[in-house]
Image: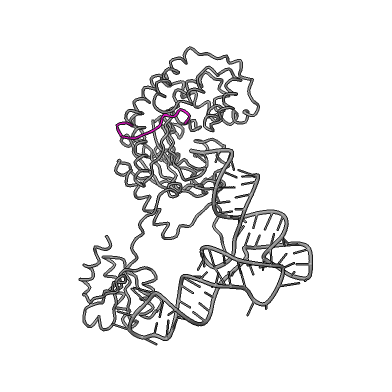
Amino acid sequence: MIQRPRGTRDFPPEEAHRRRAVREKMIDVMERWGYREVATPTFEHLELFTLKSGEGVIEEIYSFKDKGGRDIALRPELTAPVMRMYVSELHSSPKPLRLYYFANCFRYERPQKGRFREFWQLGCELIGGKRSDSEAEVIAMADEVLRAVGIKGDIHIGYLGLMRSMLKKVPEAHRQSIMRLIDKKERDALRELLQSIGAEDLGIMELISLKGRGALDRAEELSAALSSVEISTECAESVHSSMETACGEGRREGARASARSGRSPESEVKLSEFREMLELLDAYGVEATVDFEIVRGLEYYTGTVFEIYTSGLGAQNQICGGGSYELASLFGGSETFSTGFGLGFDRIMEVVGEVDQPKPPVVLAFTPDVKIDAIRIAKRLRNVFPVIIDVMGRSLSAQLKSASAIGAEHVIIVGRRELDSGKLVLRNMVSGSQEEMSIEEIEERLRSAFV
RNA sequence: GCCGGGAUAGGGUAGUGGUCAUCCUGCGGGACUGUGGAUCCCUCGAGCCGGGUUCGAAUCCCGGUCCCGGCCCCA
Protein backbone atom coordinates (compact mmCIF):
# COMPACT_ATOMS: atom_id res chain seq x y z
CA MET A 1 0.00 0.00 0.00
CA ILE A 2 1.38 3.37 -1.01
CA GLN A 3 0.78 6.12 1.49
CA ARG A 4 0.33 9.80 0.80
CA PRO A 5 3.43 11.90 1.33
CA ARG A 6 3.40 13.66 4.63
CA GLY A 7 1.38 16.82 4.88
CA THR A 8 -0.67 16.13 1.75
CA ARG A 9 -4.33 15.30 1.55
CA ASP A 10 -6.85 13.53 -0.64
CA PHE A 11 -10.17 15.19 -1.21
CA PRO A 12 -12.98 12.66 -1.72
CA PRO A 13 -16.04 13.81 -3.68
CA GLU A 14 -17.88 15.45 -0.81
CA GLU A 15 -14.86 17.37 0.40
CA ALA A 16 -13.80 18.32 -3.10
CA HIS A 17 -17.28 19.71 -3.64
CA ARG A 18 -17.16 21.68 -0.39
CA ARG A 19 -13.86 23.19 -1.41
CA ARG A 20 -15.07 24.13 -4.82
CA ALA A 21 -18.26 25.71 -3.48
CA VAL A 22 -16.35 27.82 -0.97
CA ARG A 23 -13.70 28.77 -3.51
CA GLU A 24 -16.32 29.90 -5.99
CA LYS A 25 -18.06 32.10 -3.46
CA MET A 26 -14.80 33.87 -2.67
CA ILE A 27 -13.70 34.17 -6.27
CA ASP A 28 -17.08 35.58 -7.14
CA VAL A 29 -16.49 38.48 -4.78
CA MET A 30 -13.15 39.30 -6.34
CA GLU A 31 -14.62 39.14 -9.82
CA ARG A 32 -17.26 41.62 -8.73
CA TRP A 33 -14.50 43.95 -7.61
CA GLY A 34 -13.10 43.73 -11.12
CA TYR A 35 -10.16 41.44 -10.41
CA ARG A 36 -9.03 38.98 -13.09
CA GLU A 37 -7.65 35.55 -12.41
CA VAL A 38 -4.06 34.75 -13.28
CA ALA A 39 -2.16 31.50 -13.12
CA THR A 40 1.56 30.88 -12.93
CA PRO A 41 3.73 27.75 -13.10
CA THR A 42 3.70 25.28 -10.25
CA PHE A 43 7.49 25.43 -10.24
CA GLU A 44 9.83 28.35 -10.76
CA HIS A 45 13.50 29.08 -10.56
CA LEU A 46 14.54 28.89 -6.94
CA GLU A 47 16.10 32.32 -7.25
CA LEU A 48 12.70 33.97 -7.63
CA PHE A 49 11.91 33.13 -4.04
CA THR A 50 15.29 33.67 -2.48
CA LEU A 51 15.43 37.06 -4.13
CA LYS A 52 12.18 38.01 -2.47
CA SER A 53 12.48 36.36 0.90
CA GLY A 54 16.17 35.68 1.45
CA GLU A 55 18.28 32.55 1.46
CA GLY A 56 16.72 31.53 4.74
CA VAL A 57 13.60 30.27 3.03
CA ILE A 58 15.44 27.54 1.15
CA GLU A 59 15.11 25.39 4.21
CA GLU A 60 11.34 25.34 3.82
CA ILE A 61 11.15 25.21 0.05
CA TYR A 62 10.68 22.07 -1.97
CA SER A 63 13.57 22.57 -4.32
CA PHE A 64 15.59 20.29 -6.55
CA LYS A 65 17.87 20.26 -9.52
CA ASP A 66 16.13 19.32 -12.75
CA LYS A 67 17.74 17.12 -15.36
CA GLY A 68 19.38 20.16 -16.89
CA GLY A 69 20.99 21.11 -13.59
CA ARG A 70 18.72 24.10 -12.92
CA ASP A 71 17.69 24.96 -9.36
CA ILE A 72 13.95 24.61 -9.36
CA ALA A 73 11.45 25.26 -6.57
CA LEU A 74 7.82 24.31 -6.10
CA ARG A 75 6.19 27.65 -5.43
CA PRO A 76 5.86 28.41 -1.71
CA GLU A 77 3.63 31.44 -2.35
CA LEU A 78 2.32 33.46 -5.28
CA THR A 79 3.19 37.08 -4.79
CA ALA A 80 6.64 36.62 -6.28
CA PRO A 81 5.41 34.64 -9.31
CA VAL A 82 2.64 37.15 -9.99
CA MET A 83 5.04 40.06 -9.74
CA ARG A 84 7.45 38.19 -11.99
CA MET A 85 4.68 37.83 -14.54
CA TYR A 86 3.82 41.48 -14.14
CA VAL A 87 7.36 42.60 -14.78
CA SER A 88 7.94 40.27 -17.70
CA GLU A 89 4.66 40.59 -19.57
CA LEU A 90 2.12 42.91 -17.99
CA HIS A 91 4.11 46.01 -17.09
CA SER A 92 2.73 47.93 -20.07
CA SER A 93 -0.89 47.07 -19.36
CA PRO A 94 -3.23 49.89 -18.31
CA LYS A 95 -2.86 50.64 -14.61
CA PRO A 96 -3.93 49.68 -12.14
CA LEU A 97 -3.89 45.91 -12.57
CA ARG A 98 -6.31 43.98 -10.47
CA LEU A 99 -5.23 40.35 -10.32
CA TYR A 100 -6.20 37.39 -8.21
CA TYR A 101 -5.10 33.80 -7.95
CA PHE A 102 -6.12 30.54 -6.39
CA ALA A 103 -3.42 27.91 -6.40
CA ASN A 104 -1.64 25.22 -4.48
CA CYS A 105 1.66 26.04 -2.80
CA PHE A 106 4.30 23.87 -1.15
CA ARG A 107 6.36 24.32 1.95
CA TYR A 108 8.50 21.79 3.74
CA GLU A 109 7.12 22.31 7.22
CA ARG A 110 5.96 20.24 10.13
CA PRO A 111 2.22 19.65 9.64
CA GLN A 112 -0.19 20.69 12.35
CA LYS A 113 -3.72 22.02 12.57
CA GLY A 114 -4.35 24.23 9.54
CA ARG A 115 -0.86 23.66 8.19
CA PHE A 116 0.08 21.27 5.42
CA ARG A 117 2.93 20.73 3.03
CA GLU A 118 0.67 21.22 0.08
CA PHE A 119 -1.81 23.98 0.76
CA TRP A 120 -3.94 26.40 -1.19
CA GLN A 121 -3.72 30.14 -1.25
CA LEU A 122 -6.20 32.63 -2.53
CA GLY A 123 -4.87 36.10 -2.98
CA CYS A 124 -4.86 39.30 -4.94
CA GLU A 125 -2.41 41.92 -6.09
CA LEU A 126 -3.46 45.46 -6.93
CA ILE A 127 -0.57 46.80 -8.96
CA GLY A 128 0.07 50.41 -9.75
CA GLY A 129 -2.61 52.09 -7.68
CA LYS A 130 -2.24 54.99 -5.29
CA ARG A 131 -1.41 54.16 -1.73
CA SER A 132 -4.41 54.91 0.50
CA ASP A 133 -7.04 54.00 -2.04
CA SER A 134 -5.38 50.73 -2.99
CA GLU A 135 -4.89 49.68 0.58
CA ALA A 136 -8.45 50.46 1.57
CA GLU A 137 -9.81 48.60 -1.44
CA VAL A 138 -7.75 45.51 -0.84
CA ILE A 139 -8.56 45.32 2.85
CA ALA A 140 -12.25 45.91 2.24
CA MET A 141 -12.26 43.23 -0.41
CA ALA A 142 -10.52 40.75 1.90
CA ASP A 143 -13.19 41.44 4.48
CA GLU A 144 -15.93 40.86 1.94
CA VAL A 145 -14.33 37.69 0.61
CA LEU A 146 -14.38 36.26 4.12
CA ARG A 147 -17.90 37.42 4.82
CA ALA A 148 -19.05 35.72 1.63
CA VAL A 149 -18.27 32.40 3.28
CA GLY A 150 -19.65 33.37 6.65
CA ILE A 151 -16.42 34.37 8.37
CA LYS A 152 -16.18 37.56 10.37
CA GLY A 153 -12.47 38.07 10.63
CA ASP A 154 -10.73 40.16 13.24
CA ILE A 155 -8.79 42.70 11.18
CA HIS A 156 -5.65 44.28 12.60
CA ILE A 157 -3.99 47.03 10.64
CA GLY A 158 -0.50 48.28 11.24
CA TYR A 159 1.64 50.90 9.62
CA LEU A 160 5.34 50.55 9.07
CA GLY A 161 6.24 54.11 8.06
CA LEU A 162 6.60 55.48 11.55
CA MET A 163 8.38 52.42 12.81
CA ARG A 164 10.89 52.65 9.99
CA SER A 165 11.51 56.32 10.84
CA MET A 166 12.18 55.34 14.42
CA LEU A 167 14.48 52.56 13.33
CA LYS A 168 16.49 54.93 11.20
CA LYS A 169 17.79 56.31 14.49
CA VAL A 170 18.96 52.86 15.52
CA PRO A 171 22.19 51.26 14.33
CA GLU A 172 21.38 49.27 11.24
CA ALA A 173 22.59 46.03 12.74
CA HIS A 174 19.75 46.01 15.25
CA ARG A 175 16.83 46.89 13.03
CA GLN A 176 16.01 43.40 11.94
CA SER A 177 16.25 42.07 15.49
CA ILE A 178 13.88 44.73 16.73
CA MET A 179 11.35 43.96 14.01
CA ARG A 180 11.55 40.27 14.75
CA LEU A 181 10.99 40.78 18.46
CA ILE A 182 8.00 43.00 17.75
CA ASP A 183 6.53 40.48 15.37
CA LYS A 184 7.00 37.70 17.90
CA LYS A 185 5.49 39.84 20.64
CA GLU A 186 8.48 39.33 22.91
CA ARG A 187 8.11 42.53 24.86
CA ASP A 188 10.64 41.83 27.60
CA ALA A 189 13.41 40.88 25.24
CA LEU A 190 12.58 43.90 23.11
CA ARG A 191 12.71 46.30 26.02
CA GLU A 192 16.02 44.83 27.08
CA LEU A 193 17.49 45.22 23.63
CA LEU A 194 16.29 48.80 23.27
CA GLN A 195 17.78 49.73 26.61
CA SER A 196 21.06 48.07 25.82
CA ILE A 197 21.48 50.23 22.74
CA GLY A 198 20.12 53.37 24.37
CA ALA A 199 17.07 53.49 22.15
CA GLU A 200 14.40 53.37 24.84
CA ASP A 201 13.39 56.99 24.23
CA LEU A 202 12.34 56.52 20.63
CA GLY A 203 8.85 55.49 21.64
CA ILE A 204 8.96 52.06 20.03
CA MET A 205 7.59 50.34 23.10
CA GLU A 206 4.72 52.76 23.31
CA LEU A 207 4.04 52.67 19.60
CA ILE A 208 3.52 48.94 19.47
CA SER A 209 1.14 49.05 22.42
CA LEU A 210 -1.11 51.55 20.68
CA LYS A 211 -4.35 49.92 19.69
CA GLY A 212 -7.73 51.03 18.44
CA ARG A 213 -9.22 54.52 18.36
CA GLY A 214 -6.87 57.19 19.49
CA ALA A 215 -3.85 55.17 18.53
CA LEU A 216 -3.34 57.33 15.52
CA ASP A 217 -3.38 60.64 17.42
CA ARG A 218 -0.78 59.38 19.85
CA ALA A 219 1.28 57.95 17.01
CA GLU A 220 1.38 61.39 15.43
CA GLU A 221 2.62 62.88 18.66
CA LEU A 222 5.32 60.25 18.81
CA SER A 223 6.19 61.04 15.26
CA ALA A 224 6.47 64.77 15.95
CA ALA A 225 8.64 64.13 18.99
CA LEU A 226 10.90 61.82 17.07
CA SER A 227 12.90 64.56 15.38
CA SER A 228 14.16 65.76 18.75
CA VAL A 229 15.33 62.34 19.86
CA GLU A 230 18.87 61.31 19.10
CA ILE A 231 20.68 58.25 20.25
CA SER A 232 24.35 57.63 20.31
CA THR A 233 25.63 55.20 17.74
CA GLU A 234 28.44 54.30 20.08
CA CYS A 235 26.25 51.79 21.79
CA ALA A 236 26.26 49.73 18.66
CA GLU A 237 28.55 47.06 20.03
CA SER A 238 26.72 46.39 23.26
CA VAL A 239 24.31 43.85 22.04
CA HIS A 240 23.17 40.44 23.10
CA SER A 241 25.28 37.83 21.47
CA SER A 242 22.14 35.86 20.83
CA MET A 243 21.06 38.48 18.35
CA GLU A 244 24.08 38.11 16.15
CA THR A 245 22.67 35.41 13.96
CA ALA A 246 19.47 37.24 13.23
CA CYS A 247 21.38 40.43 12.54
CA GLY A 248 23.63 38.67 10.09
CA GLU A 249 20.76 37.13 8.21
CA GLY A 250 18.92 40.36 8.04
CA ARG A 251 21.73 42.55 6.88
CA ARG A 252 21.18 42.32 3.17
CA GLU A 253 17.48 43.00 3.43
CA GLY A 254 18.03 45.61 6.06
CA ALA A 255 20.25 47.53 3.73
CA ARG A 256 17.64 47.37 1.05
CA ALA A 257 14.97 48.69 3.40
CA SER A 258 17.01 51.57 4.66
CA ALA A 259 17.74 52.67 1.14
CA ARG A 260 14.02 52.69 0.59
CA SER A 261 13.28 54.66 3.75
CA GLY A 262 15.92 57.14 2.71
CA ARG A 263 14.01 58.24 -0.31
CA SER A 264 10.65 58.26 1.48
CA PRO A 265 9.03 61.52 2.49
CA GLU A 266 8.72 62.50 6.13
CA SER A 267 6.88 60.10 8.35
CA GLU A 268 4.25 62.66 9.25
CA VAL A 269 3.12 62.88 5.66
CA LYS A 270 2.81 59.15 5.47
CA LEU A 271 0.83 59.03 8.69
CA SER A 272 -1.68 61.37 7.13
CA GLU A 273 -1.98 58.92 4.28
CA PHE A 274 -2.55 56.16 6.77
CA ARG A 275 -5.22 58.29 8.39
CA GLU A 276 -6.88 58.81 5.05
CA MET A 277 -6.79 55.09 4.36
CA LEU A 278 -8.60 54.45 7.65
CA GLU A 279 -11.23 56.97 6.66
CA LEU A 280 -11.74 55.20 3.36
CA LEU A 281 -12.13 51.93 5.23
CA ASP A 282 -14.86 53.58 7.26
CA ALA A 283 -16.57 54.48 4.03
CA TYR A 284 -16.37 50.84 2.98
CA GLY A 285 -18.00 49.95 6.27
CA VAL A 286 -15.06 47.85 7.39
CA GLU A 287 -14.30 47.53 11.07
CA ALA A 288 -10.64 47.18 11.87
CA THR A 289 -8.32 47.65 14.79
CA VAL A 290 -5.32 49.91 14.41
CA ASP A 291 -2.44 47.93 15.79
CA PHE A 292 1.14 49.12 15.41
CA GLU A 293 2.35 45.76 16.60
CA ILE A 294 1.59 44.29 13.20
CA VAL A 295 4.90 44.53 11.39
CA ARG A 296 4.99 41.30 9.38
CA GLY A 297 8.75 41.03 9.68
CA LEU A 298 9.33 41.16 5.95
CA GLU A 299 11.40 43.97 4.58
CA TYR A 300 9.60 44.55 1.32
CA TYR A 301 6.47 45.79 3.01
CA THR A 302 6.50 49.56 2.82
CA GLY A 303 3.48 51.03 4.55
CA THR A 304 0.22 49.58 5.65
CA VAL A 305 0.26 45.96 6.73
CA PHE A 306 -2.64 43.91 7.97
CA GLU A 307 -3.52 40.53 9.36
CA ILE A 308 -6.89 38.88 9.85
CA TYR A 309 -7.54 36.36 12.57
CA THR A 310 -10.36 34.02 13.37
CA SER A 311 -11.13 31.64 16.18
CA GLY A 312 -11.42 27.89 16.03
CA LEU A 313 -8.04 27.19 14.48
CA GLY A 314 -5.85 26.46 17.47
CA ALA A 315 -2.36 27.82 17.16
CA GLN A 316 -2.74 28.82 13.52
CA ASN A 317 -5.40 31.48 13.92
CA GLN A 318 -4.24 33.83 11.19
CA ILE A 319 -6.15 33.36 7.96
CA CYS A 320 -5.03 36.34 5.96
CA GLY A 321 -2.06 38.65 5.73
CA GLY A 322 -1.15 41.45 3.42
CA GLY A 323 0.02 44.94 2.88
CA SER A 324 1.70 47.32 0.53
CA TYR A 325 5.02 46.36 -0.91
CA GLU A 326 7.61 47.18 -3.47
CA LEU A 327 8.82 44.13 -5.34
CA ALA A 328 8.69 44.94 -9.03
CA SER A 329 12.10 46.58 -8.98
CA LEU A 330 13.56 43.53 -7.30
CA PHE A 331 12.57 41.45 -10.32
CA GLY A 332 13.95 43.94 -12.79
CA GLY A 333 10.94 46.17 -13.34
CA SER A 334 10.51 49.80 -12.50
CA GLU A 335 9.33 50.68 -9.06
CA THR A 336 5.61 50.09 -8.81
CA PHE A 337 3.44 50.55 -5.78
CA SER A 338 1.49 47.38 -5.08
CA THR A 339 -0.85 46.07 -2.45
CA GLY A 340 -2.06 42.55 -1.92
CA PHE A 341 -3.14 39.85 0.44
CA GLY A 342 -2.77 36.13 0.73
CA LEU A 343 -5.46 34.05 2.28
CA GLY A 344 -5.05 30.56 3.72
CA PHE A 345 -7.75 28.57 1.99
CA ASP A 346 -7.28 25.41 4.04
CA ARG A 347 -7.73 27.29 7.27
CA ILE A 348 -10.87 28.82 5.90
CA MET A 349 -12.15 25.35 5.12
CA GLU A 350 -11.60 24.46 8.78
CA VAL A 351 -13.88 27.26 9.84
CA VAL A 352 -16.70 27.35 7.30
CA GLY A 353 -19.79 25.33 8.01
CA GLU A 354 -21.58 22.74 5.92
CA VAL A 355 -22.13 23.21 2.22
CA ASP A 356 -25.08 21.85 0.27
CA GLN A 357 -24.08 18.76 -1.65
CA PRO A 358 -25.31 18.31 -5.22
CA LYS A 359 -28.33 16.13 -5.85
CA PRO A 360 -27.48 12.58 -6.84
CA PRO A 361 -27.98 11.92 -10.56
CA VAL A 362 -31.09 10.37 -12.04
CA VAL A 363 -30.71 6.63 -12.53
CA LEU A 364 -31.82 5.21 -15.85
CA ALA A 365 -32.64 1.60 -15.01
CA PHE A 366 -33.15 -0.80 -17.87
CA THR A 367 -33.75 -4.44 -18.59
CA PRO A 368 -30.67 -6.06 -20.16
CA ASP A 369 -32.41 -6.61 -23.51
CA VAL A 370 -32.77 -2.85 -24.21
CA LYS A 371 -29.31 -1.67 -23.22
CA ILE A 372 -28.60 -0.07 -26.59
CA ASP A 373 -31.79 2.01 -26.45
CA ALA A 374 -31.08 2.91 -22.83
CA ILE A 375 -27.70 4.30 -23.77
CA ARG A 376 -29.27 6.46 -26.49
CA ILE A 377 -31.93 7.76 -24.12
CA ALA A 378 -29.34 8.51 -21.42
CA LYS A 379 -27.24 10.44 -23.91
CA ARG A 380 -30.21 12.60 -24.80
CA LEU A 381 -31.32 13.17 -21.21
CA ARG A 382 -27.84 14.27 -20.10
CA ASN A 383 -28.38 17.48 -22.02
CA VAL A 384 -30.94 18.35 -19.37
CA PHE A 385 -29.84 16.68 -16.12
CA PRO A 386 -27.25 14.22 -14.82
CA VAL A 387 -28.00 10.60 -15.66
CA ILE A 388 -26.20 7.39 -14.81
CA ILE A 389 -26.76 3.90 -16.16
CA ASP A 390 -25.66 0.51 -14.95
CA VAL A 391 -22.27 -0.71 -16.09
CA MET A 392 -22.15 -3.87 -13.98
CA GLY A 393 -24.65 -5.99 -15.85
CA ARG A 394 -27.01 -5.87 -12.92
CA SER A 395 -30.59 -7.03 -12.87
CA LEU A 396 -33.30 -4.39 -12.86
CA SER A 397 -33.91 -5.16 -9.23
CA ALA A 398 -30.24 -4.64 -8.42
CA GLN A 399 -30.25 -1.37 -10.37
CA LEU A 400 -33.10 -0.09 -8.23
CA LYS A 401 -31.27 -1.18 -5.12
CA SER A 402 -28.17 0.62 -6.30
CA ALA A 403 -30.16 3.76 -7.04
CA SER A 404 -31.51 3.65 -3.55
CA ALA A 405 -28.02 3.24 -2.12
CA ILE A 406 -26.70 6.39 -3.76
CA GLY A 407 -29.72 8.37 -2.65
CA ALA A 408 -31.18 8.95 -6.11
CA GLU A 409 -34.50 10.78 -5.96
CA HIS A 410 -35.67 9.69 -9.38
CA VAL A 411 -35.29 6.54 -11.42
CA ILE A 412 -36.40 6.19 -15.00
CA ILE A 413 -37.27 2.63 -15.93
CA VAL A 414 -36.97 1.40 -19.50
CA GLY A 415 -37.84 -2.03 -20.88
CA ARG A 416 -39.38 -3.54 -23.98
CA ARG A 417 -42.87 -2.47 -22.89
CA GLU A 418 -41.87 1.17 -22.47
CA LEU A 419 -40.07 1.30 -25.80
CA ASP A 420 -43.10 -0.12 -27.56
CA SER A 421 -45.54 2.30 -25.93
CA GLY A 422 -43.20 5.30 -26.10
CA LYS A 423 -43.89 6.00 -22.44
CA LEU A 424 -41.11 5.52 -19.89
CA VAL A 425 -41.66 4.99 -16.20
CA LEU A 426 -40.56 7.82 -13.93
CA ARG A 427 -40.33 6.61 -10.38
CA ASN A 428 -40.00 8.90 -7.40
CA MET A 429 -37.74 7.07 -5.00
CA VAL A 430 -38.72 9.20 -2.05
CA SER A 431 -42.47 8.77 -2.25
CA GLY A 432 -42.44 5.45 -4.06
CA SER A 433 -44.98 6.62 -6.63
CA GLN A 434 -44.40 6.36 -10.35
CA GLU A 435 -46.07 7.33 -13.60
CA GLU A 436 -45.68 6.77 -17.30
CA MET A 437 -44.35 9.68 -19.32
CA SER A 438 -42.76 10.42 -22.66
CA ILE A 439 -39.12 11.46 -22.79
CA GLU A 440 -40.16 15.05 -23.44
CA GLU A 441 -42.40 15.05 -20.40
CA ILE A 442 -39.63 13.62 -18.25
CA GLU A 443 -37.21 16.27 -19.43
CA GLU A 444 -39.73 18.95 -18.59
CA ARG A 445 -40.57 17.47 -15.19
CA LEU A 446 -37.00 17.09 -13.98
CA ARG A 447 -35.41 20.11 -15.62
CA SER A 448 -36.27 22.40 -12.73
CA ALA A 449 -34.98 19.98 -10.11
CA PHE A 450 -31.43 20.36 -11.39
CA VAL A 451 -30.81 24.05 -11.82
C1' G B 1 14.64 20.48 14.26
C1' C B 2 11.98 19.60 19.36
C1' C B 3 7.78 17.69 22.81
C1' G B 4 3.29 14.77 23.76
C1' G B 5 -0.66 11.29 22.06
C1' G B 6 -1.83 7.75 18.33
C1' A B 7 -1.94 3.66 14.03
C1' U B 8 -6.26 -3.56 14.07
C1' A B 9 -10.75 -4.81 6.90
C1' G B 10 -13.26 1.03 3.01
C1' G B 11 -15.33 3.49 7.91
C1' G B 12 -15.99 2.55 13.35
C1' U B 13 -14.33 -0.89 17.00
C1' A B 14 -12.99 -5.51 20.82
C1' G B 15 -9.28 -8.38 22.69
C1' U B 16 -5.29 -11.80 24.52
C1' G B 17 2.61 -13.39 24.59
C1' G B 18 -0.23 -19.41 22.29
C1' U B 19 -7.02 -22.74 18.14
C1' C B 20 -9.45 -20.06 12.41
C1' A B 21 -8.20 -12.20 15.48
C1' U B 22 -14.00 -9.82 17.62
C1' C B 23 -18.36 -7.19 16.55
C1' C B 24 -21.00 -3.21 13.82
C1' U B 25 -21.14 -0.95 9.22
C1' G B 26 -19.72 -1.17 4.17
C1' C B 27 -18.75 -3.32 -0.95
C1' G B 28 -20.29 -7.42 -4.29
C1' G B 29 -23.85 -11.42 -5.04
C1' G B 30 -28.32 -14.17 -3.93
C1' A B 31 -33.37 -15.35 -1.89
C1' C B 32 -36.56 -11.69 -5.51
C1' U B 33 -33.63 -12.60 -13.61
C1' G B 34 -39.74 -6.00 -14.86
C1' U B 35 -39.42 -2.41 -9.41
C1' G B 36 -35.25 -0.15 -4.24
C1' G B 37 -35.20 0.63 1.21
C1' A B 38 -36.99 -4.32 5.52
C1' U B 39 -35.33 -9.36 6.54
C1' C B 40 -32.31 -13.59 5.83
C1' C B 41 -28.04 -16.07 3.47
C1' C B 42 -23.17 -16.16 0.99
C1' U B 43 -18.59 -13.88 -0.56
C1' C B 44 -14.75 -10.01 0.03
C1' G B 45 -11.79 -7.45 3.29
C1' A B 46 -7.30 -5.98 8.80
C1' G B 47 -3.16 -5.73 13.36
C1' C B 48 1.66 0.81 9.37
C1' C B 49 6.85 -0.81 7.88
C1' G B 50 11.66 -2.95 9.37
C1' G B 51 14.53 -5.09 13.03
C1' G B 52 15.02 -7.38 18.06
C1' U B 53 13.46 -10.47 22.51
C1' U B 54 10.88 -15.38 22.50
C1' C B 55 9.68 -22.14 21.20
C1' G B 56 5.94 -18.55 19.61
C1' A B 57 4.80 -11.27 18.74
C1' A B 58 -0.77 -7.99 16.27
C1' U B 59 0.47 -7.85 21.86
C1' C B 60 6.92 -6.58 24.81
C1' C B 61 11.53 -3.51 23.12
C1' C B 62 14.15 -0.38 19.33
C1' G B 63 14.18 2.34 14.74
C1' G B 64 11.42 4.37 10.74
C1' U B 65 6.81 6.03 8.27
C1' C B 66 2.26 8.44 8.65
C1' C B 67 -1.83 10.84 11.57
C1' C B 68 -3.52 14.35 15.64
C1' G B 69 -2.09 18.48 18.89
C1' G B 70 1.76 21.94 20.65
C1' C B 71 6.86 24.47 20.10
C1' C B 72 10.15 26.61 16.30
C1' C B 73 8.98 28.83 11.83
C1' C B 74 5.27 30.99 9.06
C1' A B 75 7.14 34.68 2.45
Q: Where's the N terminus of chain A, which quadrant?
A: bottom right
- Residue A448, magenta (yes or no): no
Q: Where's the C terminus of chain A, which quadrant?
A: bottom left
Q: Judge by depth and name the residue closer to the eye, A356 or A422.
A: A356
- Give coordinates of residue A239: x percent, y percent: 63, 23
| Extent of the magenta region | A281-294
Q: Residue at x 45, y 35 (%)?
A: A331
Seen in the picture, residue A293 relative to B55 is either above or below; the reply is: above
- Residue A293, magenta (yes or no): yes
From the viewer's perspective, tell me whether residue A51 is left or right of residue A352: right
From the viewer's perspective, tell me whether residue A169 is left or right of residue A134: right
Seen in the picture, residue A293 relative to A49 is either above or below; the reply is: above
Tell which residue pokes out farthest to the top in this image: A228
- Give coordinates of residue A63: x percent, y percent: 55, 46
From the viewer's perspective, tell me whether residue A107 is left or right of residue A345: right
Residue A68 seen = no
Q: Judge by depth and name the residue closer to the eye, B5 or A47.
A: B5
Q: Judge by depth and name the residue closer to the eye, B32 or A80.
A: B32
- Give coordinates of residue A391: x percent, y percent: 39, 75
The answer to which image quadrant residue A272 occupies is top left
Residue A380 seen = yes
- Give coordinates of residue A295: x percent, y percent: 48, 30
